[in-house]
Amino acid sequence: MADERDVAATLAERPELASALDSVRPVDDDMDTWTFEDVPVDSGTFGELVAADLVAKVDGEYRLPDATLQALDGDAEPGTAGGTNIEDDRNPSRNLSIAVPDPDWRGVAALAGALAVVVLFRTAFSVGSVFRDGAVVLSGNDPYAYRYIVEGLLTEGGGFDAALLTDMPMAQGEPLTIATLYWVAGLLGDGASAAGAVMAWYPVVSALVTGLLLYLLAVRLTDDRRVGLAAVVLLATTPAHALRTSLGFADHHAFDYPWLVLAAFALVVLADQGEEAYRDPRAWLAGLGIGVGVAGQILAWDNGTALVVPVALVVALGVLLDVDADRSPVLANAPLVGGLAFATLVVRRAHGEMGWHTDFVVGVPLLLLAGTVGVLAIGEAVHRLDLPTLAFVGAELAGAVAAFFLVPTVVPDFWSRADGRLDRFFDTRNIVETQPLISGDLTWFLLLGLVLVIAIPPLIWASRRAADGAKPWLIGSVYAWFLLALAAIQVRFVGELAAFTALFGGLGFVWMAHWVDLASVPRPFADEKPDPRATRGAEAADGSLETLRVPTAREAGLLLALFLLVGGVGVLQTPIKTSQITITDGTYETAAWIEEDARVANLSYPDDYVLTEWGRNRVYNYFVNGESRSYSYARYHYETLFTETNESQWYRQHRNRVGYVVTQSAPGGNVSSASLFPRLHDGFGTESSTATGMSHFRAVHATEDGQYKTFRLVPGATIAGSGPPDATTTLSRSIEIPGASFTYERTVETDADGAYAVTVPYPGEYRLWNETVTVSERNVTSGDRVG
């Protein structure tokens, strides 16, 4: 058996064994002897402890020998054992050094690797689509609205100009998102290239920040680095989050995620402080974090007000736990009040000085602050009067009912706006992101995979722990349940939910690894107490974290297999979902061709406006004319191509607003062959057995696969002349355009006097009966009469 000096030397060389012994020590203190199943250590590590004589076998069971105990208590030489520097113990003058622990480089490297996976899954499947031909081709449609605004601000200010933040575009929608993108682009340059690069990379940066905050949240909540790492990797491969933070998808959603996780993390940190929070600087720093998170959520997006609802729920339920545990709600939550006051001031100042958001949005943090103060006041009264917990519950319910009837009377304008916003909020509008997550088409499975499945049991367990008084677990479970309910209503919130399914999924994954004997039991499951944090100070948190151990090759392979079992759906679906939002080669090729054609023709907006299906309309118009702020016109008028049969009437209605029309793969369903769309997309506007030829749609481009076809609206040249009375002939001309060739045909009829007139959109020579008529390009674009 090794003596204490040998043990100390071993632990100095193998700090991960010291951490494992720290996990075993409480069990050894409580029991004379114990078995492997009694301790929270995986089989591989336990075998090393036995082999190194750090654990002794007694009558078929185990115990810690005296030498190990003395080394852990710091009574042995040399070096460090159990986290204590022995030389410093004998030299008090050097004890200050132990206040700053050495960096855990193994943990840092593991976290860096997990974050690298986040970057990989957000860039590998879209980098070729985003950066091509020297251009930045953002993914999706909405990012081009933000790009339009940011580039416009850069042009107007000649770079970043803070004065332009006042009443800027989208000041009522996503002001902080726009302002941040504008500021960063202004730092890097003052042109479209800088804006494009910033907007392409910002979602990836947001994913990195969210991943780091999620790691901190998971480790703070579970005291287990493995859970934090698993959560980050699961987030990396969750399709719902990966596609919304993918390279080039510069929508506002990516900007929302860090604020949400920051607020949750700060709430957990504050919950750890207990009744002494009011005198702890770290608690006040956490309160500031809550304020920054809440203010960021609200200023980033006008519907971010929905994302602060969990804060209100945490306050209502957290104060209930304080009262039940005989803690002073005011002392425990004073930093929270300070944080919400900070958020209220920031939001109101941004509204007052820069015109950001409406009065309704600005009123939300103030209402949250007032409600928090009211709940704390009731809780403190119940606490000081030593009333039963049910008295507080009754008071809360009475207050909620009173507020429900009082607010419409006291602030009717606020109430009516809230009611109107709820109607708009739940309006599906036939847009995919407003559809429910839980549906018959397995949307939840494609967006979250099995992560949601393995997250539910730990989430239920956490909810039970919260009910038993564990306040940090209350916060995690409230956020998860609320966002799950929100995403169940509208799928656009599944990205917010993904961070919390990854949090609890990470805990579930480590438990699964323990179940198959690849890891020790997760810390939260190893020490089930009503409130495991009640006796642990913040300074002890780092020392109680699960130390990472480098797995053997066999263990690494089995862990990878386990991960693929859990996250395999995400690994497969992430590239598929990402490809659905990247701009296809056909779209980019068509937009680039139209831009060049409009430049040669010297067309300016709106004569070069491109009418397309609304889901890609901003993309086309950004590259062709730069006017990509809105797709409203396309949304309301493109569909008329499927219903309108009268070409001349459609042309007269849209000729002053539309320059080009792009058709793309005819949709399924019952579309009349006489309507404009099939006549254009299937027949290039020429005559068919079911429809006449077209006069104002001139085919100018087609992709090689025929999926995308472009038509330019022209007045057309009217060929007029005379021929045999009541006669019929066929006008035809072979047409060749980039990507396609076809024959343009029209049937021409004369009247009783032999007169005829026909309008054609193509220049060239046309033979009618015995005469040949030449139509010039100018005749077509000017609407001349020829003949």
Image (cartoon, rainbow, N blue to C red):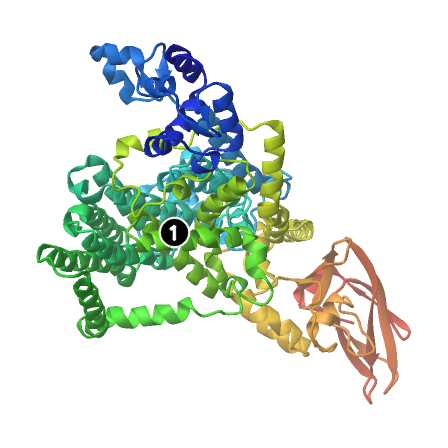
User: Where does residue 557 sit, x and y in percent of width and height?
Assistant: 63, 34
In the drawing, does residue 34 fall left or right of residue 677? left
* Residue 774 visible to an observer of this rendering: yes
Q: Nearer the viewer, residue 68 or 520?
A: 68
* Residue 579 position (above or below residue 609): above
Q: Residue at x 43, y 42 (%)?
A: 210
Q: Nearer the viewer, residue 661 or 200?
A: 200
Q: Please name the residue that numbered disc 1 is placed on.
A: 462
In the drawing, does residue 254 fall left or right of residue 710? left
Can you say which quadrant of the picture contains the N terminus? top left
Give the SS element for disc 1: helix
User: Where does residue 395 sit, x and y in percent of width and height?
Assistant: 17, 66
User: Residue most toward the front?
Assistant: 59
Q: Residue at x 27, y 31 (%)?
A: 539
- Number of numbered discs: 1
User: Residue most toward the left?
Assistant: 385
User: Where does residue 143 sit, x and y in percent of width and height?
Assistant: 50, 51
Q: Quadrant of residue 377?
A: bottom left
User: Where does residue 97 sit, x and y in percent of width and height?
Assistant: 27, 16
Q: Residue at x 40, y 39 (%)?
A: 523
Can you say which quadrant of the picture contains the C terminus? bottom right
User: Residue most toward the bottom?
Assistant: 752
**Dot 1 alpha-carbon crowd within 10 angstroms: few under 14, some 14 to 19, many 20 or more:** many
* Residue 191 visible to an observer of this rendering: no
Q: Disc 1 marks which amino acid?
A: Ala
Q: Nearer the viewer, residue 122 or 159?
A: 122
* Residue 230 position (above or below residue 677): above
